[in-house]
Amino acid sequence: MWIRRGPRGRPAEGEPLARDAAGEQPRPLWRNRNFNVFLSVQTLSVVGDSFSTLAMPLLVLHATGSIVQMGLLTGLAGAASIFTGIFAGVLADRVNRRALLIACDLVRALVYALIPLVWLFSPQIWLLYVVVPIGAALGMVFQVAYVTVVPGLVDEGQIMKANSRLYGTYSIASIMGPVLAGLVSAMYGPSAAIAADAGSFAVSAAGLCFVRPRLRSATAVGDASPPISQAGWKDVLVGARFLWGHPALRSLTVLLSFLTFLTLGLTDLIIFHLKHDLGQPDSAAGYVLASAAVGSMAAAVFAGFARRSLGFGACWIGSYALCGVAISFIGLSANVPTVAVLATVFLFCRGTAGICSMSLRQEVTPDRLLGRVTSAFWTIHAALGPIGAALLTWGAARFGVAVVCLAAGITCLAIALCATLTPIRHPRPELLPAEARK
């Protein structure tokens, strides 16, 4: 899976996001200008992301016909993200976060534009091995900064709702994106689809110029400790220490490391299965990814209700158990509609678990540490991803997609079962004290 990627009258820097002295209710999200501008430009950017998610594997497949090279490039992108993630949180906590987001988008727009320009003359696979890691590294910095900005765009108590709104709107964009990408790729080639993604980065950068996030105070997230001042590697390790000190976040990080190993290369497997095993055109891959995005949209609507009704543990564990079932049968599917349904189930379940996980991390982490904690979380749990992508695609080339998907799905089910023995099983892990172990 391709890694990418998220004044007048504004409060003073560091002002807490909470109800006013009169105890008035927070304003609705639809009246929040900052949030809505951010939501709009990032939704458009997601449409562009959908183009590259489909076009990059197709570009490699058209030029080489090798799923192994698809996996290697995915793994290289993952490795670049992991390395960058070590320092991304420090950047997000030390510099202007909005400026950091804009810079990442501008550079990615320029870098991705190189691919269609070069492809006008002749395909150069080596360029992908340069551009994709750079794009992935910048994407990691953007993602970390994005997570730290969201709490500063909404009022207190609206983080879960904001994440669901963002995820849902992005999912709607992801429905049309792959369809358009498949059609553009079929008509003009995958490089044209990547050009559209480059344009979306430019639009995102322009829109972010009109967003004015603010900081939450330490007391807004239940943290009254003095600021931590570290340097070098000690500063980088602050986020990891916070993760390890919270029982639920510690367990999530460990288990997600293995889940990422199993799922990072899943998009490559689906595209290869459609193109190689089922003999489908590029547009079919677009339709499958688009229909699967409906699952993400449903997750955005369902996640908040499910967490309130069933509790965090049931949502997260149940979601990944169903993911395992869906993955197991993808490689055995003999037609496009079945692949689409299973991919939809997978994205629905992964989306539900992801919204719950990210919201929990934002709720329990002090704002001054949120960048480093997010960076450490993604860096650690993504560490095995590149190896998994390379091994899964190699296994698919040697043993077939069906065998690899079945093995990955059964392992995913086993990991979900293991989660029942950890603090993840608690309905409200945000209330667990840091010293808890069970």
Image (spheres, helix red, strand yellow):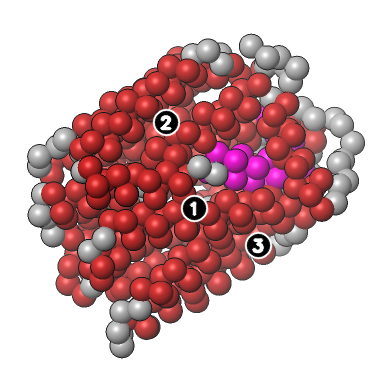
Q: Residues within 10 Å of mark 3 (few under 14, many from 20)?
A: some
Say how many tags the image has.
3
Q: Which residue is mark 3?
A: 100
Q: Which residues are magenta?
A: 364-382
Quadrant assignment for the C terminus: top right
- In x, y percent, where is residue 184? 22, 68
Left or right: 121 with respect to 354? left
What's the residue type where badge 2 is placed?
A: Thr
Q: Residues within 10 Å of mark 2 (few under 14, many from 20)?
A: many
Foreground label between 3 and 1? 1
* The quadrant where residue 413 appears: top left
* The quadrant where residue 374 appears: top right
Q: Are the residues at dot 3 and dot 1 in contact (C-beta closer than 8 Å)?
A: no
Residue at x 64% of width, y 46% of height: 375
- In x, y percent, where is residue 269? 27, 47
Relative height, residue 39 to residue 205 (above, below): above
Q: Secondary structure at mark 1?
A: helix
Q: Which residue reaches farthest front?
A: 398
Relative height, residue 403 to residue 89 (above, below): above
Q: Is residue 261 magenta?
A: no
